[in-house]
Image: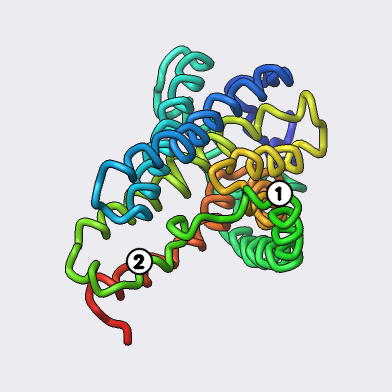
Amino acid sequence: MTNTQSLPAHVDAPVDTKQYSLTKILAIWASVTAPMALLAFVVAPAIMARTSLYAGLVYWMLMVVGMMWQFVVSLAVLRHELGGLHWADVKKRIRLNLPRSPATGRPRRLLFLWVVPAIAANFLGEQLASRLDTAWTDWLPALHEPSYTRIQGLVDPQFQGQWWILGLTVTSILFNYLLGEELLFRGVLLPRMAGVFGRWDWVANTVLFGLYHVHKIWFWPSMIASSFGCAWAAKRYRSLWMSVIVHGIEGYFIVLVVAVLAGWYP
């Protein structure tokens, strides 16, 4: 009789091992990138010209709409692939599980510690690429960042007590770091990119993720350089939670928002 205890750990196979073609990868990418460009450069200026609402808030709300659209696209793709949106199938397909050991395939909570070097890599990449941002916008002056896109613009007494902005912040964080960008890029796309890009699928995923930020085109170099940790962690440990945590560390800006709304600043 075979001693099952001596066998290697079983690694759960994905629900569907079929990989995407390059055409499908780019089509899904374009389906979320084009709307962001439209919202940022067409819809936003049109609304700003017709409202007294602070331009930065108009821009921010439209970007949240764009990220909500990513959630819709993700659900549509998953429903088509899986023949429905049954939670057990969806969870396995997007790898919403504990990180797994690259060697044994076993899920281990201790592997969450690898988010620390991934976060550090993102931070280092952003710092190293900041000069490229400057060179990029100096080469194409039309790409200089509009002042209203900066979150720092909210540090103004006029926003004190406007607590609805906190609701916008929470919604933005939810769709930026979980239901929008991470779900689509690391949950839907990344597990299906190896057929085209092989072992470098996480690199290609990062580049596509950076270029998707056409609404922040002035930051393209640092946007790419500061995102490799997200895709690397999700790929190596086969867990969407890894990239959610690495990317989600940026959500600390909610502290700034609360401080402004409560008037806790000089």
For marks 1 and 2, give the one nearer the viewer: 1
74 left or right, relative to 257: right
58 left or right, relative to 151: left
Please provide percent x and percent y for residue 263: 24, 78
Residues under labels 1 and 2: Cα distance? 27 Å
Residue at the extreme bottom: 266
Q: Amino acid at mark 1?
A: Leu
| Residue that badge 1 annotates | 140
Q: Which mark is residue 162?
A: none
Q: Mark 1: few, some, or many residues within 10 Å (few <14, many ≥20)?
A: few
112 left or right, relative to 161: right
Please provide percent x and percent y for residue 38: 48, 32
Query: Would you say residue 7 is visible in this rendering?
Result: no
Q: Quadrant of residue 33?
A: top right
Please provide percent x and percent y for residue 237: 67, 48
Q: At 33% from the left edge and 56% from the top edge, which residue is drawn?
A: 169
In the rendered view, would you say 174 is above or below 253?
Answer: above
Chain-order first, disc 1 or disc 2: 1
71 left or right, relative to 27: left
Q: At 72% from the left edge and 55% from the top edge, which residue is drawn?
A: 225
Q: Mark 2: few, some, or many residues within 10 Å (few <14, many ≥20)?
A: some
Q: Amino acid at mark 2?
A: Leu
Query: Would you say residue 25 is visible in this rendering?
Result: yes
SS for dot 1: loop
Q: At 60% from the left edge and 54% from the top edge, which residue is drawn?
A: 144
| Residue that badge 2 annotates | 154
The residue nearer to you, when weighing 7 against 259, is 259
The residue nearer to you, when weighing 221 against 116, is 221
The residue nearer to you, when weighing 7 against 21, is 21
In the rendered view, would you say 235 is above or below 111?
Answer: above
